[in-house]
Image: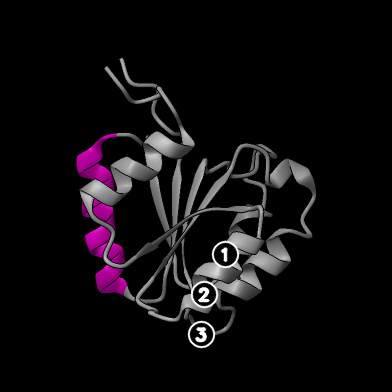
Amino acid sequence: MIDKLNEILLVDDNEADNFLHRVVLERAGVAKAVTEKLNGQEALDYLTTADVDGRYPQPELICLDINMPIMNGWEFIEAYEQLDPKFQSGVVIMMLTTSLNPEDAACAERHETVRAFSNKPLTSESFAAMLEENFPGRFSD
């Protein structure tokens, strides 16, 4: 039996990308829930707002776009790294981008919280490789 991720959080302002990425994630069948937020600020607000029972969302994977309005991916990372460690525990951040700028990949490497960097669109193959690297043995037969 697969030990599914509690939640995957998609943070991207492009609804078409979110739709495509949701299809890839749901076909993989590795998450109990997939949640979408349209910019970094929405994602931060989501992560730091308790539900009626006082529980905070605990996604194990955040798929984060770089170029978004209001708060872009880099601004999200800067703010995220300032959060109480309870919000960061066990979370893998995967940057997803259409950017061909090599500085974006270099910048991602400088942030310990960013564990994967991939070009959009997310594919089944790139997602499987990221899972194997960041959740070793969790999804193998």
- Which secondary structure is most common in the magenta stretch? helix
- Of marks 2 and 3, which one's residue comes earlier in the chain? 3
Label 2 sits on a secondary structure element that is helix
Type of the residue with mark 2: Asp
Nearer-the-camera pick, 59 or 75: 75
Going 34% across and 26% down the picture, which residue do you hit?
A: 139
Q: Is residue 20 magenta?
A: yes
- Of marks 3 and 1, which one's residue comes earlier in the chain? 3
- Name which quarter of the figure residue 141 lies in: top left
Type of the residue with mark 1: Ala
Going 38% across and 34% down the picture, which residue do you hit?
A: 132
Residue 53 percent across, percent down from the top left: 65, 37
Image position of 91 with respect to 121: above or below: above
Q: Which residue is mark 2?
A: 104
What is the residue that sits farthest to the bottom in this orientation? 69
Q: Which residue is mark 3?
A: 69
Which of the two discs, 2 and 3, sits closer to the camera? 2
Q: Which residue is mark 1?
A: 108
Type of the residue with mark 3: Pro
